[in-house]
Structure formats: C-alpha cells, structure tokens
Image: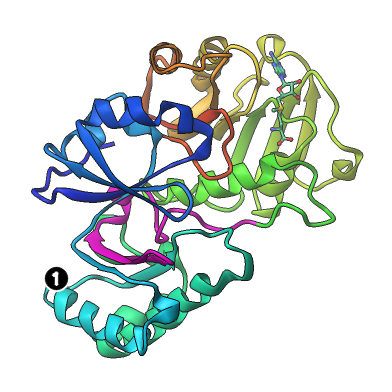
Amino acid sequence: MEQTPRLQTTWLVRISSVFHDLEDRILATLGAVLVKRLGRDFLLIRLEEPGRLGSTGAAKYLRWILPVEHAWPCNPRETDGFIEKAAQAMFRKFSAAGPQTLMAGPLDPAEPGRYHKSLASNLRGRALQLFPPGMAALKDAEEQDPQQPTLFALLGKEGLFCGVHRPRESKGFHAGGTRFIRQNRPETISRAGAKIAEALHHLALHRPRPARGSHWLELGASPGGMTSELLDQGYQVTAVDKAPLDPRLDGREGLRFVRSDASDFHPPRGARYDAILSDMNGDPRESMARVAALSANLAPGGIVVFTLKLAGAEDFEGIERVTSEALAAARGLKALALVHLTYNRHEFTVFLEKASDS
Ligand SMILES: C[S@@+](CC[C@H](N)C(=O)[O-])C[C@H]1O[C@@H](n2cnc3c(N)ncnc32)[C@H](O)[C@@H]1O
C-alpha cells in the first residue's frame, strides 16, 4: 500500500464505473484537478502532492495509476506512420530509464472492433525491437519484478500516454491494470471464479501465490465459482457454506464441502490451512471477525483473500467507515492491500497475511 512520492504532476488514474458517483469527492480528497476523461474509466489529472495517491481514503478507489511522462495527443487511426513514430519517441524518451519491459494496452478495453487493442500490441512489438533484447524476454506479465520499473503505454482515440512505474505502485502488471479473464465458458459456475483468478494475479504484486497443492479454507463458497477456479489451479479446498455447491463440483478431487454456517464451522483438530478465502455476503465486519478467529488455523505466513462487501454503504464516509471497521476486525492479520479489482462489483478485495513467526 506504499506509494513513493514523485514530482510528476500529471497522472493517469482509473476509477471503476461502480464508483463514478464518488469521482468528484475522490479527486477532491486527492487534491487533484481533472484535465480530461480518456477511454473507459481513465482520468488524466494534475496533482500537487502525488504522495496522496497512496495515503488517503481515496486511494482504494484508484484501480490503476501511472505518472504521464510522455503524451502524444492525436488520433492514431488518422496519423501516418503512428506506430513507427510512437515507438521511436518512446525509445528516445525512456531507454535511459532502463525499464524491465514494455506493457501496452487500450484506454478502452471494451471498444467494439478492438482497433486500439491490436494497435497497442503492434506498438509493443515494434518498440521492443528498438529497446535492448532482454526487455522482450518476458513470456507472462507476472514474470515482471513488481518492484522494478516497467514502461507502460495506454492508447486510444485520444492519443498515447506513457510513463515508467513499478507494477506494484501502478497496482497491476498490465497497462491499465486488467488481466482479461473469460467468464462465459460453458463450465463457468459463477462469475466469482474470475474474481479469485484476478485476485491471485494481483497477489503476485505483493508476494508469491500459494504453491500448488496448498490447502484453502473457503467461506461463502456456494455455488462454487471460486471453488472451481481454486481446484483448477491445483489447490485443495475445504469449502463452507449454508447453501449447497453446484452439482458439477460433486466428486472433484481435492474438495471437501461442509454445509454449515461459518460461525458454526470448527476446523478438525490440528487442521492447518495455507490460505483462507472469504466471499460471504452480509456484514463484512462480522465476516472479517469470523475469518480472524479461524486464522488460528492458518499457517504462519499464510494469506487471506477477503471480499469486502460494502453492506449498503454508498457514500464516501459510509464506505470509509465500513472498510476501516472491517480492517479493524482483522485482528492478528496484516493488511497487504485493499483494492477494487476489475471483476469486483460494489465491494473491494482485501489481502491479509499472518505473521510468519506466529
Ligand atoms: C456471493 S455468494 C458466494 C459466491 C461464491 N464465492 C462463488 O464463487 O460462487 C455469498 C455466499 O455466502 C454465503 N454466506 C453468507 N453468510 C454466510 C455464513 N455466515 N456462513 C456460511 N455461508 C454464508 C451465502 O450462502 C452465499 O452462498
């Protein structure tokens, strides 16, 4: 959750449409002035104190953040030789910074026709030919070192916006923050599967994911979208819910289902979980208190992934109160991050960790 203060004054930030009603308040809390809206969910802003991006109640609404160190306002579709000119300019401007790689993406990921998505991919390909070969070596976005600078480029019909930032500080390995996860496969049990897949991707900004074979305790598992995703990723799961799991999960290897209220669930004697996942609806302060109690059975250094539902809170103060009270209920657990991920709705995802010497 730390943010390195920088002198850069123009930033690109992304605020999910879920929180558009709060946008003025978020910007005021940051001390930011809106310069321009870009693509889908992106705002170009001016800031007097960039340190506020990570240190105020507004920080949790910022899905993705980039200092804009190079901008080319233009319509790429109507600009002759856009890719070559943009790639050369990026090389001149950023090669001395020694970024670990270049990640490029569209300002509007849902754009019909996906013209700028493929333009971003072509721009990345051409620019990487100019930079040292090591920059192109990454096969997967998660191979980036979250603490080393990456050159990010976003483009759309408004032009090209670039900057160098550490993925952890930008809050994502991909330009714009989103890793696309298909939600409509025939075997998809619920959309929540995308939520845990994205959460595990995001976790890698802060620490390695639990190893294959690790044992998860999952609270609020029904109908089982997240359970299914965890099993697909090679984990063992003890799933708990008052409601049943989808029958497609019957007999899945590595799964134990306990039909129970989480407050009546008591782990078997000596049980040790490597991770806890909670997606229970209801008051997040109560859910968090239950997770904190069950963390007695969490291995030292184990993680918690917790969906913090906003319990009807809609305004800035109400949301602030619910989130801070839920975090206060996480006794004995250290918060690593609290974020609004792409596949979250009116909720945040919180990552917590149990001390490794406890
Ligand atoms: C949003 S749904 C979970 C979706 C699920 N994670 C998935 O991937 O399909 C919330 C679930 O929390 C369960 N729940 C809420 N409070 C609970 C409690 N106290 N104990 C057990 N389950 C609870 C509900 O029964 C419901 O199935």
Residue 234 horizontal/vertical position (percent): 66, 53
What residue is at 51 percent from the left and 70 percent from the top?
117
Is the image coloured rainbow, by chain, by secondary structure, or in one colour? rainbow
Residue 8 part of the magenta segment: no
What residue is at 64 percent from the left and 14 percent from the top?
282
Q: Quadrant of ligand 1?
A: top right
Other residues around mark 1 within 10 Å, as few (<14) / some (14–19) / many (≥20): few
What residue is at 44 percent from the left and 46 percent from the top?
203
Residue 174 appears in which quarter of the rendering? bottom left
Disc 1 marks a residue whose amino acid type is: Ala
Q: Which residues are magenta?
A: 153-181
Q: Is the N terminus in the top left, top right, bottom left or bottom right quadrant?
A: top left
Residue 154 horizontal/vertical position (percent): 37, 64
| Depicted 24 relative to depicted 7: above or below | above
Mark 1 element type: helix
Residue 158 part of the magenta segment: yes
The one nearer the camera, 7 or 200, is: 7
349 vs 160, left or right, is right
What residue is at 17 percent from the left and 40 percent from the top?
47
Residue 307 horizontal/vertical position (percent): 55, 29
228 vs 292, left or right, is right
Q: Is the C terminus in the top left, top right, bottom left or bottom right quadrant?
A: top left
Residue 86 appears in which quarter of the rendering? bottom left
Residue that label 1 marks: 97
Instruction: Determine if residue 99 is in view.
Output: yes
285 vs 87, left or right, is right
| Depicted 130 relative to depicted 255: above or below | below
Residue 133 horizontal/vertical position (percent): 29, 87
